[in-house]
Amino acid sequence: MCTPYVRKEANRFNWIIKGQLINKSESDATIEKLYDSYFKRIWGNHENCVHEHGFEEAYTVRLNEMYEEELEKVAVLGYD
């Protein structure tokens, strides 16, 4: 299982290179491979920060969507 740091950085690298976030359905193994591959690709590219505009907002929206999906799976306890 990949860590939240690796997941976020892989998404950031994908944003820099492709201009979009990684699909939510991708497996942890795929995300780790993308992280390693894109890390090597942008290493030493000092212009990559220009392409980060909008990433934090998009990733925050993604995290909120994932949080909402998780909440739908949680049982709601109450008294009838």
Image (tube, rainbow, N blue to C red):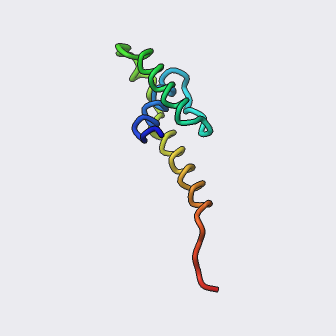
Question: Between 8 and 34, which is closer to the camera in this rendering?
Answer: 34
Question: Between 55 and 38, which is closer to the camera in this rendering?
Answer: 38
25 to 76, vertically: above or below = above
Q: Quadrant of residue 8?
A: top left
Residue visible at 56% across and 32% down in the picture: 22
**Position of 54 compared to 75: left or right?**
left
Q: Could you tell me residue 63's position as x and y percent?
A: 50, 47
Farthest right residue?
80
Residue visible at 58% across and 64% down in the picture: 74
Q: Could you tell me residue 68's position as x and y percent?
A: 57, 56
Count of number-bearing discs? 0
Q: Could you tell me residue 9's position as x and y percent?
A: 42, 32
Farthest bottom residue?
80
Residue visible at 51% across and 26% down in the picture: 14
Q: Could you tell me residue 38's position as x and y percent?
A: 47, 20
Q: Quadrant of residue 47?
A: top left
* Image quadrant where one finds the C terminus: bottom right
Residue visible at 56% across and 49% down in the picture: 66
Question: Between 67 and 20, which is closer to the camera in this rendering?
Answer: 67
79 to 70, vertically: above or below = below
56 to 43, vertically: above or below = below
**Position of 23 compared to 59: left or right?**
right
